[in-house]
């Protein structure tokens, strides 16, 4: 009985720390409604991929990365978003997103 009384508080504290320490989940890929234009009046420049946290993710960041790699980029299409969510001590939440798409340049002579 003394053994249980002596180690019970340590057991409770250890159990709480393990239960609240954190977990990680992955969200399924999300597809944006940004498909290739049907008329084919564009040139494919290449695939673009960025990874960023929730507060720094979005289409404009993907487009600016595409313009860094391909300065003539007009649009990014076929966008796929994959997410990883992490919880630390059940209170701190972090979401990291990986976005990828295809950079295209519209042909001005065919428009």
Image (tube, helix red, strand yellow):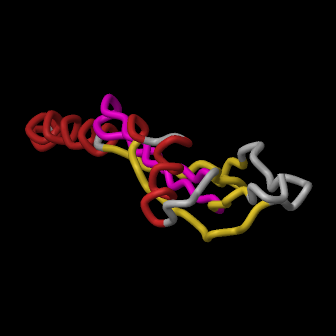
For residue 25, side relative to residue 31 (left or right): left
Is residue 25 visible in this depiction of the protein?
Answer: no
For residue 34, side relative to residue 98 (left or right): right
For residue 47, side relative to residue 39 (left or right): left
The residue lying toward the viewer, choosing from 53 and 11, is 53
Magenta stretch: dominant secondary structure: strand
> Which residue appears at 75% of the width and 59% of the height?
107
> Which residue appears at 13% of the width and 41% of the height?
7
Please tell me whether residue 69 is drawn above or below residue 2 in the rendered image.
below
- The image quadrant where one finds the N terminus is top left
Instruction: Look at the image and give the residue range highlighted in magenta.
Output: 81-102
Question: Quadrant of residue 110 in the image?
Answer: bottom right
Please tell me whether residue 28 is drawn above or below residue 46 in the rendered image.
above
Q: Residue 97: image x %, image y %?
A: 49, 49
Q: Residue 47: image x %, image y %?
A: 60, 68
> Which residue appears at 56% of the width and 60% of the height?
72
Q: Residue furthest front?
A: 109
Is residue 93 shown in magenta? yes
> Which residue appears at 62% of the width and 61% of the height?
103
Is residue 18 shown in magenta? no
Q: Residue 24: image x %, image y %?
A: 44, 50
The residue lying toward the viewer, choosing from 42 and 7, is 42
The residue lying toward the viewer, choosing from 110 and 18, is 110
The residue lying toward the viewer, choosing from 87 and 30, is 30
């Amino acid at each position: 009985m003394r053994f249980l009384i002596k180690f019970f508080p340590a057991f409770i504290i250890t159990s709480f720390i393990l239960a609240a320490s954190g977990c990680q989940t992955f969200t399924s890929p999300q597809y944006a409604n940004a498909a290739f234009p049907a008329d084919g009046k564009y040139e494919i420049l290449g695939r673009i991929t960025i990874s960023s946290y929730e507060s720094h993710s979005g289409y404009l960041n993907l487009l600016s990365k595409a313009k860094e790699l391909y300065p003539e980029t007009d649009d990014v299409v076929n966008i796929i978003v994959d997410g990883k969510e992490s919880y630390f001590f059940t209170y701190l939440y972090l979401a990291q997103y990986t976005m990828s798409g295809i950079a295209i340049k519209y042909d001005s002579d065919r428009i």
